[in-house]
Amino acid sequence: MRSFDATRERRAPRTYRGVTLHGEQVRGEFDSPTLVVAVKANCGGCQSVFASPVDAFGDVATMIVAARPSNEPFWRTSSHRVLVSESLLEELEIRWPPCYVLIDPSQEKVLCEGAVFAPEQVREEIAPYLM
């Protein structure tokens, strides 16, 4: 499976802020190309993201982001750190998780985006942008 729509040209933020699932406030700067994977509660397709190893998306900084936290057990047992940040999703114009955007903070732009079917599919779709 592959994503269907072309990437919409838009600006990507250089900074982010949010809260971890443990309530820790987080602020930071994107300092390299970063894959932002948007997830949501009650999403069967998101389970493959949470179950995947940290390097499942390839050799790229990866951030799993949700607008709101979930009490689903696989959210807390995942090896991925989850950031709850509705503001980051709004800045990236992400409306329909599960989806991803690959951002380049040096250019402040979204390089590519798509739907998430599986980590392997996302890794394949973003690979040409990481060379």
Image (cartoon, grey):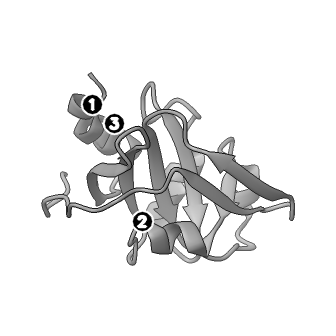
Residue visible at 34% across and 59% down? 11
Tell me the quarter of the picture where residue 93 sits. bottom left
Q: Amino acid at mark 3?
A: Arg
Real-space Cα separation, disc 3 to disc 2, in angstroms: 20 Å
Among numbered discs 3 and 2, the one appearing first in the sequence: 2
Can you tell which mark lies on residue 127? 1
- As displayed, is residue 93 above or below residue 5? below
Residue 85: x and y in percent read 63, 68
Residues packed near mark 1 inside 10 Å, few (<14), some (14 to 19) or many (20 plus): few
Location of mark 2 (residue)? 92
Residue 113: x and y in percent read 28, 55
Residue visible at 70% across and 73% down? 69
Residue visible at 20% across and 64% down? 8
- Label 3: state its secondary structure: helix
Location of mark 3 (residue)? 123
Residue 88: x and y in percent read 54, 66
Q: Is residue 48 left or right of residue 77?
A: left
Real-space Cα separation, disc 1 to disc 3, in angstroms: 6 Å
Foreground mark, 2 or 1? 2
- Label 2: state its secondary structure: loop
Q: Residue furthest front?
A: 107
**Whether label 1 touches label 3, CB < 8 Å:** yes
